[in-house]
Image (cartoon, coloured by chain):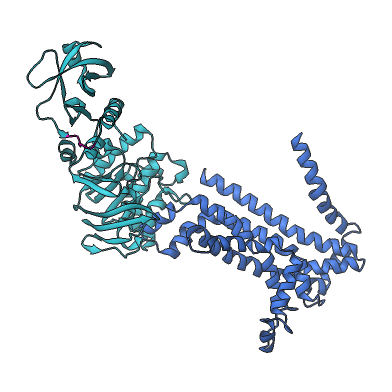
Chain colours: A cyan, B blue
Amino acid sequence: MSIEIRNITKTFGDFVALDDVSVGIRPGSLTALLGPSGGGKSTLLRIVAGLETADSGAVAIDGVDATRLPPQRRGVGFVFQHYAAFPHMTVARNVAFGLDIRHRPKDEVRARVEELLRLVHLEQFADRMPGQLSGGQRQRMALARALAVEPAVLLLDEPFGALDAKVRKELRDWLRRLHDQVHVTTVFVTHDQEEALEVADEIVVVSNGRVEQVGSPDDLYDSPASEFVMSFLGPVTMLGGRLVRPHDVELLGIAVVGSVAGVVEGVQRVGNEARIQVGVPGAPSVAAVLTRAALRDLDVRVGDTVWLRLAKGATSMAATPASSPDDAARGAGSVLTGAVSAPR
Amino acid sequence: MLRLVVIAYLVLLVAWPVSLVFTGALSDGLGPVIDTFTDPLVLRALRLTAVAVLWAVVLNTVFGVGVALLLVRRSFPGRRLLAALVDLPLAVSPVVVGLALVLVYGSRNGWLGAPLAQAGVQIVFSTPGIVLATTFIAMPLVLREVVPVLEEVGTDQEQAARSLGAGPWATFRRITLPAIRWGVVYGMVLCLARAIGEFGAVKVVSGNLIGQTQTATLSVEELYMNFDRQGAFAVAAALSSVSIVVIIIVGLLRTRMEKRRGS
């Protein structure tokens, strides 16, 4: 089932959470709303669910205008960051809630709950109370509960945000597999670009209440529409006045045509990755990332002179002329730390 | 050391005096106690108290939960004012409450009471007045217990229920009410205890017509004034037992529920 979001605007007092946002979500896709915290992505999701009302604009779910419909009539399943488990009901009753509300026959409810608990691998926990489950289990229960009513669309608001890194990774893979099984149109909100790139078919980058870009993970990574998208999706550095990714910077031991000379300022090994910082005269330091093997071949140390050039087929874009050298320097600085862990 | 101080304080202020009420009731054996509780006037007073308390608990529970939802879940102009206003009954002396009710509902001069009296409805010096006074003085007790619980529970569960297809009423009954039920029960117990013990406001609005508008607390006073100390203690002991028993039951229920929930 498709979702059409047209010209949605939402303000909280003076704060513009969403500014004339229009997005279409393809039926059966797994879409990530990606962006920094406070950028409006959660608000957008809640407006689609009917948990929040837009100041203006329209939402259509499966071709039906849902702008004025209350949440219980939109056919959406919603999963909250903090699970929103019903603590006074067993896991099975939690999952059955939507079916009970619809007064479905008892046998049908029991069969459906069993099926869903199997799907989320919680069949042996049916009679537990949510308080006895771990965070990851609770979130899987919440997912089963949302799926029970066969929603037209499944909406997840930072579904893994409250979980620790390992469980998070597991649930990510599991959500991807689940979606391949269930095929329900799914939209999830995340501020973690790795999560979006890994799980989603389609990514909508939202920032400052606006849609920055819509596309597949590869589209976005390979041809970002703006400096913001490029730097949000992964680490960036500056080479010859252009914004590039550190792994697209080639380090050479000899001068070639079109290369820039620089002096190695720092070498940091993290597992199989080597992060090299190169000082270039008249420009901010450049960050480059090599594999361990490439570093060994090159055999550079701090103080050595190297030549830098852009790898073939690299993604690059002109840095905005507006950014002063100061900004660029700061940008490059943050890249060096940014290369250690992907920007959040 | 601190524990000793607290225990001594509670014993001197609460446990000892209350236990003396019970021993006082039994000081001359069971005979006079039986006499007291077979006295038709005492029985009528107890029944009137029961009626007033029942109404007060029901009205204050419905009002308390409703207003708590309004205060916590909605934002509207005048919300703060309303929050302050509902605490008023606890701040004002019960005697003043009684007088205020007479001013409004008095059948001779009350600006609402006079027209009502002409229509044949008597409020002051009658059961409705006693119900009103009892309800008034215990008004915020349920509300005050429910508000913090509602705030703590948050709106996620309710929104989840809505997205799963529950309408506002089903959401309230299946999700909100179970979440706040201990707050509601505590509030009801407090309300019950407070309503049973109410004296000042009821005294003003009841007119203390023996056998008609005399509540149990008023009859305790009367028995005491007429030198029937044992009778007074007996009724007083009965009143406090009710509250104590209810509080114990709630305590037991709560422990059991928490064990079951495993949290």
B186 versus B48 height, above or below: above
The stretch of residues the image draws in magenta is A318-322
Left or right of residue B47: residue A55: left
B114 versus A244 height, above or below: below
Residue B21 figure quarter? bottom right
Q: Residue at x 36, y 60 (%)?
A: B165
| Quadrant showing the N terminus of chain B | top right
Q: Nearer the viewer, residue B215 or A196?
A: A196
Q: Residue at x 23, y 30 (%)?
A: A236
Left or right of residue A44: residue B74: right
A45 versus A171 height, above or below: below
Left or right of residue A327: residue B143: right
Would residue B177 be seen by someone viewing this image from the given angle? Answer: yes
Left or right of residue A259: residue B28: right
Q: Residue at x 78, y 71 (%)?
A: B203
Magenta-highlighted stretch: main secondary structure? loop
Residue A275 figure quarter? top left
Q: Residue at x 9, y 22 (%)?
A: A258
Would residue A1 be seen by someone viewing this image from the given angle? Answer: no
A154 versus A134 height, above or below: below
Residue B31 on image: x %, y %: 88, 63
Residue A166 on image: x %, y %: 35, 32
Residue A252 on image: x %, y %: 13, 16
Q: Nearer the viewer, residue B254 or A152?
A: A152
Q: Nearer the viewer, residue A209 or B28?
A: A209
Q: Nearer the viewer, residue B141 or B258?
A: B141
Residue B27 figure quarter? bottom right
Residue A262 lies in the magenta stretch: no
Residue A254 on image: x %, y %: 11, 13
